[in-house]
């Protein structure tokens, strides 16, 4: 358990709770640096405040929020590499937010950025996105094996850790997650007796729903030991173990022939360098006659790496692809035809709103168990993720596909009865 909570490297979460004593005074050079940084923040109506309480903010209007910096080195780090250092410094308590964290993150996500990739972003996009078998296990352990009871604090009752579908604006998170499970099943035209392979099954909610509500036979792959154990216990408890099998193994080892291929929330962890491997699995296991599949994933409109801090501390190895990348490197080599494409971005923003609120209500419980720095890190992760979907810097795509030579189209009429965004 403790290893799963550690920072990557030798520093642990609890080590980040120490706050450096503020610098003795603000020098003229500090003020010039702060002035330059304030000019950038001004585009988002964010006010910078230095460690002596002064600010280069000159507007008479009220700011959306204040970014309070505790010392000179924190200011320099924030300017030098904001994508990484804001999360590092916020987690350490050396940068604080006065105002709504989610609202500040939303407007910050709209700050002007150059169209071209920086050298750091280029390196992250092209040289660091490796997810071989050993690296994938390490990355999954880092995030998903924190303990099932941790996720039970703030997810829904079935522990569905992917975008929900809200049929009405006042639907509960539990209702919305069931609606999402049904949506996936409808989109692939699931029928009694269908054989299904699911890769990256989480805590098993979709696989169990397919077996229970649709009479399908499911083989679900996952390399998270904690999640597989939970899913197997639930399948046995609900009398579905003979219909739904949870396999602790890498998706690349999937074999057999299936009517349906489903992946919900795993593509982000595959990495572009391994998309062809995923495409090979799809082509190998999906029946050429009558087979159909669905990919559900966080993506972007154009290639950019995941936020540097999120990639280091929360989701190592993750990458949100564009639809074009999925088409070019996964589906086209696998000889699959796209039948339906949908963006559920507003639903993910609302899903994250529910997760964040539940997490905030459990603040004392999380702090007592994991420490202050861990709470701040995960609070920032949830708030910034919500903001990214609100602002549109992240998308949530669902692609329905089938082998190119398949004579039947399953998705066209199945996908029209979809709830509008709340």
Image (tube, grey):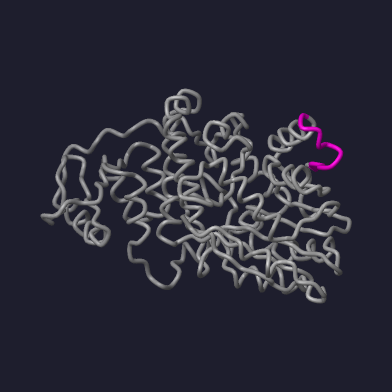
x, y (%) of residue 174?
A: 57, 40
The residue lying at 61 percent from left, 38 percent from top is 159
Determine the residue located farthest toward the top in the rendered image. 368
Looking at the image, residue 188 lies above or below residue 192: below
x, y (%) of residue 45?
A: 23, 56
Q: Is residue 245 magenta?
A: yes
Taking the image as shown, residue 9 lies to the left or right of residue 37, namely right
Total residue callouts: 0
Q: Is residue 215 magenta?
A: no
Q: Quadrant of residue 321?
A: bottom right
Residue 362: tell me if it is visible: yes
Taking the image as shown, residue 345 lies to the left or right of residue 237, namely left
x, y (%) of residue 6?
A: 54, 35
The residue lying at 86 percent from left, 55 percent from top is 255
Q: Quadrant of the N terminus?
A: top right
Looking at the image, residue 368 lies above or below residue 250: above
Magenta segment boundaries in residue numbering: 237-247
Residue toward you, 197 or 320: 197
The residue lying at 33 percent from left, 33 percent from top is 19
x, y (%) of residue 78?
A: 33, 51
Residue toward you, 180 or 277: 180
Q: Quadrant of residue 20?
A: top left
The residue lying at 53 percent from left, 31 percent from top is 153
Residue 381: tell me if it is visible: no
Residue toward you, 421 or 48: 421
Taking the image as shown, residue 93 lies to the left or right of residue 150, namely left
């Amino acid at each position: 358990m403790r290893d799963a909570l550690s920072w990557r490297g030798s520093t642990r979460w609890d080590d980040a709770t120490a706050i450096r004593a503020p610098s003795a005074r603000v020098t003229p050079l500090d003020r010039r640096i702060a002035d330059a940084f304030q000019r950038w923040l001004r585009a988002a109506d964010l006010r910078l405040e230095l460690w002596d309480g002064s600010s280069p903010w000159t507007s008479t209007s009220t700011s959306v929020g204040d970014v309070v910096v505790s010392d000179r080195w924190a200011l320099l780090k924030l300017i030098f590499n904001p994508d990484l250092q804001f999360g590092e410094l916020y987690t350490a308590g050396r940068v604080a937010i006065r105002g709504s964290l989610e609202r500040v993150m939303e407007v910050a996500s709209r700050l002007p950025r150059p169209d071209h990739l920086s050298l750091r972003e280029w390196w992250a996009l092209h040289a660091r996105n490796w997810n071989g078998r050993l690296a994938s296990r390490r990355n999954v352990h880092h995030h998903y094996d924190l303990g099932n009871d941790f996720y039970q604090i703030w997810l829904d009752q079935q522990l569905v850790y992917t975008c929900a579908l809200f049929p009405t604006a006042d639907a509960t998170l539990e209702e919305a997650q069931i609606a999402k499970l049904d949506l996936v099943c409808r989109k692939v035209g699931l029928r009694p007796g269908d054989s299904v392979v699911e890769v990256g099954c989480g805590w098993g909610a979709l696989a169990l729903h397919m077996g229970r509500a649709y009479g399908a036979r499911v083989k679900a792959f996952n390399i998270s030991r904690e999640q597989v154990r939970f899913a197997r216990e639930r399948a046995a408890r609900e009398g579905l173990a003979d219909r739904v099998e949870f396999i602790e193994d890498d998706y690349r080892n999937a074999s057999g022939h299936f009517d349906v291929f489903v992946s919900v929330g795993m593509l982000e962890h595959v990495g572009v360098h391994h998309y062809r491997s995923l495409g090979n699995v799809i082509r190998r296991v999906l029946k050429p006659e009558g087979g159909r599949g669905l990919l559900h994933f966080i993506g972007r409109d154009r290639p950019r790496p995941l936020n540097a801090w999120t990639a280091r501390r929360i989701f190592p190895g993750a990458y949100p692809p564009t639809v074009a990348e999925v088409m070019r490197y996964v589906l086209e080599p696998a000889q699959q035809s796209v039948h339906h494409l949908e963006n559920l971005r507003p639903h993910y923003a609302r899903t994250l709103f529910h997760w964040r609120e539940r997490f905030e209500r459990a603040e004392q419980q999380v702090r007592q168990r994991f420490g202050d720095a861990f709470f701040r890190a995960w609070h920032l992760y949830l708030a910034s993720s919500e903001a990214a979907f609100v602002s549109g810097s992240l998308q949530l795509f669902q692609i329905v596909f089938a082998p190119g030579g398949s004579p039947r189209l399953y998705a066209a009429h199945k996908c029209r009865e979809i709830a509008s965004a709340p």
